[in-house]
Amino acid sequence: MFPPVRVAVVIPTYEEADNIEAVCRGVRAAIPEARIVIVDDGSPDGTADVARGLAVEMGPIDVVDRVTKSGLGSAYRTGLRHAIDSGAEVCVQMDADMSHDPAMLPALVTNIELGADLAIGSRYVPGGRTVDWPWTRRTLSRWGNRYAAGVLGLAVNDATAGFRAYSAETLERIGFESVQAEGYGFQVEMTHRMVRAEGKVVEFPITFRERSAGESKMSSGIVSEAFSLVGRLWLADRRGRRDRRRRGG
Ligand SMILES: Nc1nc2c(ncn2[C@@H]2O[C@H](COP(=O)(O)OP(=O)(O)O)[C@@H](O)[C@H]2O)c(=O)[nH]1
Ligand SMILES: [Mg+2]
């Protein structure tokens, strides 16, 4: 048997009052002992209060309140730090809108227990898929991922996925708090760091279901940030290789 692993599930929220109960119940059912960390950016619909109410009934749900909407990347940095400081050895990130099926949590966590540094819930490996996404979003996501993986040589099919588990130790090793990107760029930059640090990355197939309640916060700014980020990371890699050559390494 493996030793017990302490798991925290980090869920960033902005205006998810209609979804937060279902996702918390799903997480509890899948991994009853997991600590749930909700990072809410002052949602006007009272998401944070709904979550605090659930904590009374369901046990460890930490609500980290931030005053204004400050982006997905910084919400993850805050939530992952909170999770590690609470003693988590495995940190999961997932969306609040039920796009990520909580029933897949044990599979992601088990991959970390078995030695992976990053386990990605992947839409783009055999067995993975997206449901109810308009073809425009599916195309953007699929080709965005091909572009990022091709340019950066990542050998990862779903580098923008938001459903993933990390070993806490590796998160510290890659210095996750200095990742600057927001939106999908955050996931890409984290994946890039993990690959460059020679972390073990595995992809596990999931079905991603478009939300049925609330609204997406995706914007054209988030997409263009991710595209230009890939260019910046490529340049940084090139400079790194050149410097190593000059040092004779
Ligand atoms: N705390 C916080 N959460 C956010 C922010 N933007 C998006 N989210 C949350 O991030 C998750 C994914 O966002 P979503 O709008 O569903 O993006 P999509 O799935 O790509 O359309 C959801 O749980 C959102 O509530 C933000 O600025 N701050
Ligand atoms: Mg969503």
Image (spheres, rainbow, N blue to C red):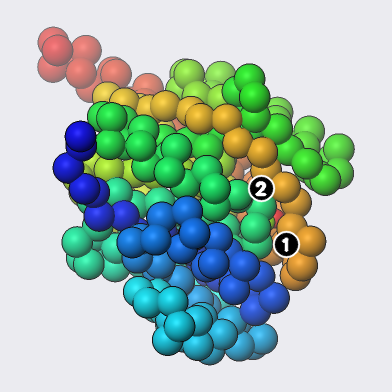
Q: How many marks?
A: 2
Q: Secondary structure at mark 1?
A: loop
Residue positioned 35% across, 74% down in the render: 60
Instruction: Give x and y (percent) for residue 19.
Output: 66, 70
Q: Kindly identify which residue carries mark 1.
A: 216
Mark 2 / mark 1, whichever is N-terminal: 1
Q: Is residue 81 above or below residue 57?
A: above
Residue 63 is at least partly visible in this image? yes
Q: Is residue 25 above or below residue 236?
A: below
Q: Are the residues tagged 2 and 1 within 8 Å (C-beta)?
A: no
Q: Which class describes the residues within 10 Å of circle 2: few (<14), some (14-19), or many (20+)?
A: some
Residue type at mark 2 is Val
Where does ligand 1 appear, by image quarter?
A: bottom right
Q: Is residue 136 left or right of residue 225?
A: right
Residue type at mark 1 is Ser
Judge: label 1 CB < 8 Å from ligand 1.
Answer: yes
Q: Which class describes the residues within 10 Å of circle 1: few (<14), some (14-19), or many (20+)?
A: few
Q: Kindly identify which residue carries mark 2.
A: 223
Which quarter of the rendering shows the N terminus?
top left
Q: Is residue 223 above or below residue 142?
A: below
Instruction: Give x and y (percent) for residue 122.
Output: 57, 33
